[in-house]
Amino acid sequence: MYGSLCASGTRMRSVLWVPLLFLAVSEAALPNLPDCQKLEDHVLDHSDPRSVFGTTREIASKSTPVRIGTLRSKGPIPTHHFATNILKSMDRVEPMRVFPYEAIMDKQGIVWDAYTMERWYDPVRTDLMEQQSAWEQGKPWVKLNDMGTNLKQMVSGPDGNPLGVFEGNSGVRVGIAGSQEPELVDFGDLYANFMFHGNGGSMEVPVVRGATLATHIFKNADPVIKPYCLSSINGQHVQFECPMERSAGDGGSGYLEGHCQGSTLKILLHSSKSMTDFKHVQWAAMPSGLWAGSHGMHTCDDAHCRLTDGGKTVEMTIPDAHGEMSFAINLVGHYVLPWDWGNAPMKTTCGGRGRRGVGDISLQATCKPDKSLTVTVNMADVGISGVDKIQWAVDSKGVWHDGFVPGMHGCDASKCSKQGNTITIHTHAPNNNYEVAVNIIGVTTLPIQNWLSQPFRGTCDGSTIGTGGSHTGGGGSHPNTPTQPPSNTHQTVNLNANTKFLMELNEPGGSLPGQTRKFVLYFSHPVQARVDASSSEVHFHLVSGGHYNGIVQIGYLGAGHRGDTSKNNYLDKYHGRYSYKPMASSCVSESRNTAYLNFDWNAVDSSGHGTGGDLLMTTLPHQALLLRKHAASHLSDSLYGFQTYEGNSWLLEYDVPHTPVDPDTAAVNRVKHNAAHKNDILAAIDRDAKNQNLAAICAHSDSYNVGKAIGLTARLASISRAFGTNHYQQLDTQIVGCLNKWLRIDDTLDSMWKFRYDMVWGGLFLKATNGEVNFGTDYGFPFYNDHHFHLGYFLYAAAYYAKHHSDWGHAHKDRLYFLARDVGNPSHRDPHFPVVRHQDFYYGFSWASGVAPGERQEESASESINCYHGLAALGDALGDPYLKHTGQLHLAMEIASVREYWQVRAHNKKHFPPMLQKNGVVGQIAEGAWYVYTLDWPCDPNRFPMRHACLVGIQVIPITAVSKYWVDKEWAGSIRDVCERAINPKLDKDYGRHDTNDHDFRTLNSGWQAFCYAAMAPLDSSHQSQAADYVRNKRPQELVGGTGAASTLLFIYGST
């Protein structure tokens, strides 16, 4: 619902949306109903927050929007829009995810890369973060991940770099010569238009969510395209720059151990991340007496290092070790072990110069360019009578394989000599690249193991290969060598004029040499292409001369075998038209109990005029799920994994959930009819009322914890009223006293807790500290983190109090609406607050992170739901249908998407990676890692399987009358296993293997147990009874902040 700023300065309506029900109408509009008034046309309140709260620019030094031109003078800048990733920093730009693409921009242009749905569930992309995983007794590097592990599902990198990030070094860059930094010139809920200027020309980029063709509008400027990893364009083979982005697989942590076998030191690096080669591992090892003087690092090579355990262990073999040995390792760019390695290396004691055994036998081989090969075998202290016990085999590299046994040559005086315990073999290599092995009859082979499959491999260039000690293979582990098509021999190639250019891009990294990714470029006028391999750019020029004026569209055609042309025409039907500044509108009909959202994609042709042709737009799973009900004929499977929708306008409808602040009357009456249940709740009301601490902390804590306390108290007061007790009277006094302080009616709070209006971005500000404001202050609230979480609790409490004390509510409506407008403003016409600050209408859910550096993410989706419930309830309490309907719409959207993306259910299970399918819930959604199974705070205890309960509980808090819409029987079945194991770890099959000395392996905190019990209660009467038994006698101090026993029991017994 962000406004669209036209050239005249007037605002046009443009809204994001997400459905619950979909009408089968191709070109649709809002229904013509008398009680369905457009929300976006109505300003909730015209009061100016600056005149009441005052102003501040305190965050300007750390966070001022960039690339916005004069937009701030026309209205607030959105803090959670998909384009805000480009606006937060000039230096650290985060990608925009627009589906089926991700995009990032700087002054060189905009880079597009594909974003396909299989990335959500491909186990190859699952990055384990094992810090909180239990470990096996005596083996701290062996993580018992079946008991639970943190993980991220990486979605940004192409198939060749599946754990990679996207920083603009893959995909296709589109730009113009001489361009400056892009500028945001217009934005709406579904789009952001950026403008590039350079050399007298311009390129406008209308970035539209869901567009299968990304469009660029050129005026007097020639397109400059840089396809990273370009392999061919219109059949012409080329070889473009192919960088490798950073990868989550590069990081991790390690555990180091070392021991001696005779005079051989074995160093084992156990890494939490698998490695494909050991080229980034360095080691240092020497007698401890020499360590202080010099302890330089050596890079791993075949002679000293090998990979085992699927790449998770690097084994380093150091010969000639004696006495106490000091050692350390460095995984270049990631970590050093031990941390203070220079002063405090790890140590172990070796057998010194005593008798050396078979494990100490070593080999070295040197081959000169004339192919003369010298092999030296050091027999350590293993005695042999002569050279006749020595055999060797040498062949060209690649000849040896399973089922083939090379011929062994026996030593004699013509080829071999012995001096002391050293045997020297003189022979010739059959090829420059050779393989060699030695057999010492009756003693061992060199390599000691796997000599046939992993012989020593060398090159006849004067280099030496070999091993010391018990190295078990000379081959080591080498990165794959990419197989590329032949490249052109000329730096520049000219291509014939065309309006369509097909590009094949190699996968980065070389691990998929036979696969390429296909992109297509469409031009509105014929152009010639000059392919410049030296700069890895393609320059396009009009055939007729002059600078280009028209559109350029780029589309992704999927990944497949090199040379596959089967999808080359997939997007031909749709090119030449595009969505430009799509509009959206919404309303709620109480007579139909339905909320409506309309999307008009505003399809235009290459001249910018309206067109009758259909667009092909990408749907996310929650949208496709609902579209299939009534508009299945518009849906089709696509190359992107997501389903696509053919059409230019959508109408979506949602069932409106129960939104008053009070518990559902029918549910309360059912509980009252069960004497035992009623008595439990009455006792809990009394106990909660005596133990809640709102009055004590209201003026002495941060906005989040005060918010949870006032939310608990309001929920308790509403239950007191519903069950006819008088506890609400004292509770009401505390609630209004606290609200008056935070709304600055009773302006007595410390200055750091006084709301002010931020002039930098446009919104409410709390300094939350007497010192310097930092990104982490008050959970990031000063920088727009978590406003919907914090203010949602205050809105909920205000809704309760205003409903039962209407005079107070109307007297302070302006102040209440400042909070409501900050997180739930429905109208682009409000000059002080952006539209529904946190919620992303395309995803249907909210983002918690604000304008601090980093990508968008959201942890507690249930607290987002609480915010929109508070909005609707406040509108209901004040008799404001626009505020009520705004809250109802966004509540319905949030619930629908939480059920789809945070919870594993029967219909969406396949959208999650295997490990999350078993867990039933995600901890966060993040743009670059999508499904994230971790928390940004420590659980109690902070170890799996107990940690599972916090991951479930953070999606339950707070329990209110609307919790039943997502905490239901189906989801209870999904999280039952992890909750039961969190509560009772002994149920876990790996429990007996865990390290009993792990101090963090203890009983789960009672508050998080309560959430697990409550979440499982809808399963059946047995789980309901177990939950009630556990919660029945708990005080608020024994539960998670913001939670009371009365509230939890009412949900357990009545689902309200």
Image (cartoon, rainbow, N blue to C red):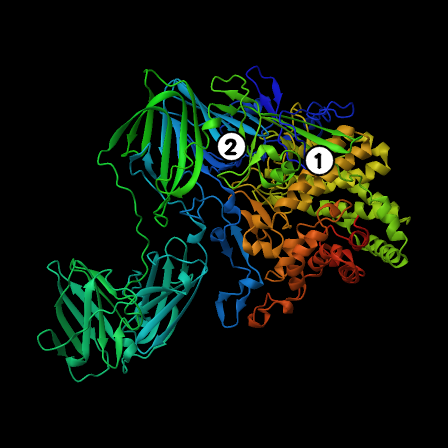
Seen at 58% across and 17% down, the residue is: 9
Seen at 63% across and 51% down, the residue is: 904
Q: Amino acid at mark 1?
A: Tyr
Q: Which mark is residue 654?
A: 1
On the image, the x and y values in percent for residue 314 come to 37, 64
Q: CA distance from mark 1 to mark 2?
A: 33 Å
- In-image side of 52 versus 147 (left or right): right
Above or below: residue 206 compared with residue 401: above
Q: Which mark is residue 87?
A: 2
Q: Amino acid at mark 2?
A: Leu
Extreme residue in the bottom direction: 385
The local crowd at label 1, few if under 14, some if 14 to 19, many if 20 or more residues have their Cα within 10 Å, is: many
Residue 633 in sight from this viewpoint: yes
Above or below: residue 59 compared with residue 197: below
On the image, the x and y values in percent for residue 226 come to 36, 33
- Identify the mark nearer the N-term, 1 or 2: 2
Residue 701 in sight from this viewpoint: no
Q: Considering the numbered disc 1 on the image, is that residue within a helix, a strand or a loop?
A: strand
- In-image side of 880 versus 758 (left or right): right
On the image, the x and y values in percent for residue 345 come to 38, 66
Extreme residue in the left direction: 414
On the image, the x and y values in percent for residue 924 come to 59, 48
Seen at 55% across and 59% down, the residue is: 149
